Amino acid sequence: RAMPHPRAVAAVAVSADGAVLLTGCRDGTARFWDVATGLPLGAPLRHLGPVTHVAFLPGGTHAVTGTAAGHVVTWDVPPQ
């Protein structure tokens, strides 16, 4: 299924259980996706610059995103 971003995707991570995908985009957004449906989980996560790094933290309830400028944000993983 298509999981569109308006610009190039620079980073991808999959949750430990394989149910959630996190993408980071050069347009300054990141998104959580439901792997089974291909649909977004919540609104885009806005950043001040290109999102170049994404990762799920141990435990599966939080993820982090990082920008090219070195800003790091922790997010709650939405339920699918």
Image (spheres, grey):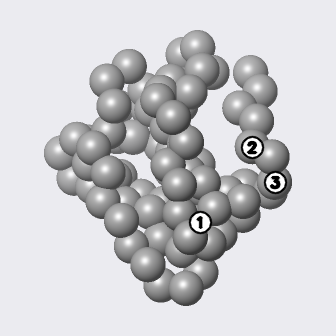
Q: Residues within 10 Å of mark 2 (few under 14, many from 20)?
A: some
How far apart marks 3 and 1 lie (CA) works out to 11 Å
Return the x and y of residue 32 as percentages of the image width and height: 49, 37
Q: Are marks 2 and 3 in contact (CB under 8 Å)?
A: yes
The answer to which quarter of the image holds residue 7 is bottom right
Q: On the rendered structure, is 1 left or right of 32?
A: right
For mark 2, what is the residue?
5
Q: Earlier in the sequence, mark 2 or mark 1?
A: 2
Residue drawn at (44%, 63%), measured in percent from left and top? 65
The image's mark for residue 7 is 3
Residue drawn at (30%, 59%), measured in percent from left and top? 74
Q: The residue under label 3 is which amino acid type? A: Arg
Q: The residue under label 2 is which amino acid type? A: His
Give the position of the N terminus as an image quadrant.
Answer: top right
How far apart marks 2 and 1 lie (CA) works out to 12 Å
Q: On the rendered structure, is 25 left or right of 51?
A: right
The image's mark for residue 51 is 1
